[in-house]
Amino acid sequence: MYLKKLEIFGFKSFADKVDIEFKDGITAIVGPNGSGKSNVSDAIKWVLGEQRIKYLRGSKMEDVIFSGTKVRKSLGYAQVSLTIDNESGVFPIEYTEISVTRRLYRSGDSEYYINKSLCRLKDIQDLFLDTGLGKEGYSIIGQGKIDHIVSSNPQDRRLILEEATGIVKYKNRKLESERKLEKTQDNLYRITDIISELE
Ligand code: ATP
C-alpha cells in the first residue's frame, strides 16, 4: 500500500488545482518558508478524516478553504482527493486502487467520497482504521510529534501502540455496542414503566 496521487483544490494556499504524483521511493517536497509544504501534509491528514482543527494548524474548519490574497478572490470550497494503491489488499475491498475525496463548502456543508461514491466521514475513518494511515496513525509524523511520542504519558503511548497493532477498530465497535445496549436498557425501563401504569 502506498500513496499514488494527491489532488488539491482550494485547500489553504492552493487556489489552483495541484496534482502531486508520488513515485516509487522517497518523495521530498522542498520550498521556501511559507510556500505551502506543510499544507500538503495538512491536506493528507484532512482527507483522511482529521476533524481536530488544531492538528490542521487553524482555529476553525473554514480556515482550510483558500481565503484569498491581495490579487485573488477567496474560494467557496476546498477539495482534496487521495489515491492509494491497494495491490497488496491491505484494504478489505476488491479494488486495487482506492480514492478518497473530501470537500468542504464555506456554508459548513461537507461531502465525502470513496471511489467517487458519496459516503459518510465515518466510512472513510473506518476504512483507514488499523491500516496505520488513519488520523490517529503513525505514518504522518508532524513537526514535534516524535518529541510528543517520547514524552507522552503511558496512556497516550498505549493509544499509539493500539492503532499500530490494529485493535482500535474493535475497541470502537465495543464502545458502539455498549452505547446501543445502554439505549436498549433505557427503552426497556420505559416500557416496564408504561406497562405498570396500564396494569
Ligand atoms: P515552513 O517551511 O516555514 O514550515 P511551509 O512551506 O511548510 O513553511 P505552510 O505552513 O505549509 O508553509 O504554508 C503557509 C502558507 O499558507 C502561508 O503563506 C499562509 O498564508 C498560507 N495559508 C494557510 N491557510 C490559508 C488559506 N486558508 N488561504 C490562503 N492561504 C493560506
Image (cartoon, rainbow, N blue to C red):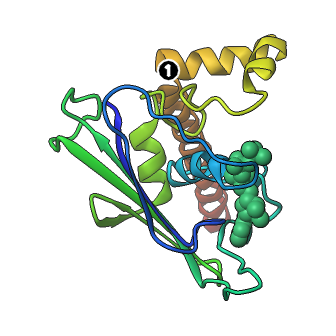
| 20 displayed left or right of 144 | left
Q: Considering only vertical position in the picture, is 118 above or below 188?
A: below
- x and y, in percent, of residue 104 in the image: 56, 72
Residue 66 visible here: yes
Circle 1 residue: 167
| 75 displayed left or right of 24 | right
Tell me what residue is drawn at x 39 percent, y 42 percent: 127
Residue 188 visible here: no
Farthest front residue in view? 32
Tell me what residue is drawn at x 58 percent, y 58 percent: 191
Tell me what residue is drawn at x 64 percent, y 77 percent: 108
- x and y, in percent, of residue 192 in the image: 61, 54
Q: Quadrant of residue 153?
A: top right
Total tally of numbered discs in the picture: 1
Nearest to the observer: residue 83 or residue 177: 83
Nearest to the observer: residue 169 or residue 77: 77
Q: Considering only vertical position in the picture, is 69 above or below 140?
A: below
Nearest to the observer: residue 39 or residue 186: 39
- x and y, in percent, of residue 173 in the image: 49, 35
| 191 displayed left or right of 52 | left
Amino acid on which disc 1 is placed: Ile
- x and y, in percent, of residue 72 in the image: 67, 86
Secondary element under disc 1, as helix, strand or loop, is loop
Q: Considering only vertical position in the picture, is 75 above or below 41?
A: below
Quarter of the image that includes the C terminus? bottom right
Ligand 1 shows up in the quarter that is bottom right
